Amino acid sequence: MGNIIFRIILVVSVSAAGYFLPPFHFSPYAGAGLGLILGLFFLFLEYRIRKSDFKIVWSTAAGTFLGLIVAWVAGLLYGIIAPDAVTTSFIRISLLIILPAVGFLIGSQRFEWFDPLQLVHFFKEKKVGGSVKILDTSVIIDGRIVEICDTGFIEGSLILPQFILKELQLVADSSDSVKRQRGRRGLDVLDRLQKSSQVTVVISELDFVEIKEVDSKLIELAKHLDAKIITNDFNLNKIAQLQGIPVLNINELANSLKPVVLPGESIRVFILKEGKEKDQGVAYLDDGTMVVVDNSRKMIGQNIDVTVTSVLQTTVGKMIFGRYNEDSP
């Protein structure tokens, strides 16, 4: 109700100004009519702005303003070069009409060109030799990204897309208790990242409304910002690599940091449970690597020395196969 009253007061005020202060030597009634038209135009403009995304409003305004500046500078330079005053006036008027219109059209169609993140990436990141990295939902919920950033292995700007934040909020508000806990953990991770002195978290309003899938939006955003994607999602990792987008996978980093064990080496493990095959026992290293040991089922619950026979690298990590020598002490 308050907004309606404000709009009515605005239209009446502009109309009254036109009546008492008629422009262009108009009569008071003509001035009031002009004021009424301007007031109604403002209401239409306000309606269109409310229905549009902020990024489109920002980009069209920035494009129009930039077009005005370019037109004014170009007209000024032409006036200095050309002695013909009539031609100079024509050129200036033409530029002041055409270039802002071009800027408006560019801003409405290519709004990502006017994204402030593009300017940050162009002037700051290229200068310091860093790179922009986009956070995925999976790596936020995982939480290990905080410790990695605190150690200084990741630096620069971390981009948090608005659509990723919305997805995380939906998970945090889920009726499923497990999903709700994961979502809230992700929000806590973001809070810790924002307080980190090693990285800067920037929320990007850039969205691609014509694309429905979040993974596809991430890939498109990475293309526009020339950025890397930090994720734990195996499928997103493969799709991004196929399209030439660099990916930082936390799981791959963790696997690469696991100690190297070569066939023939001896390791000491604790047999936790029996394996699938006859006489097999299963143990785990401190980093979670599974060790399958032959001839060790009867040693469940004990620490034994195992000779490594082979190491298998899988998509989820390493598996070590070994043999327990009953004659060993």
Image (cartoon, rainbow, N blue to C red):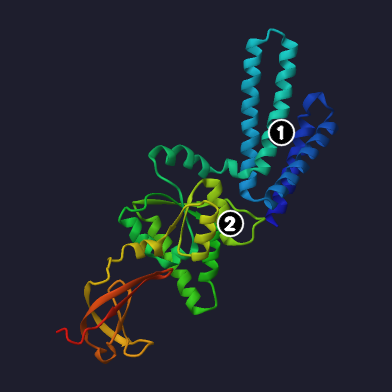
Question: In this image, 190 relative to 63: left or right?
Answer: left
Q: Label 1, on which residue?
A: 101
Q: Is residue 296 visible?
A: yes
Q: Nearer the viewer, residue 298 or 288?
A: 298
Residue drawn where x is 70% and y is 52% of the image: 51
Three-letter amino acid code at disc 1? Answer: Ala
Q: Quadrant of residue 146?
A: bottom left
CB under 8 Å between callouts 1 and 2? no
Q: Residue at x 55, y 51 (%)?
A: 221
Q: Secondary structure at mark 2?
A: helix
Q: Position of residue 299 (x, y in %)?
A: 24, 89
Residue 118 in the image, given as x and y percentages of width and height:
52, 42
Residues 99 and 242: in front is 242
Determine crowd level at label 1: few under 14, some 14-19, many 20+ residues with C-alpha closer than 10 A: some
Q: Is residue 131 above or below residue 283?
A: above
Q: Looking at the image, which is closer to me, 254 or 170?
A: 254
Q: Which mark is residue 217?
A: 2
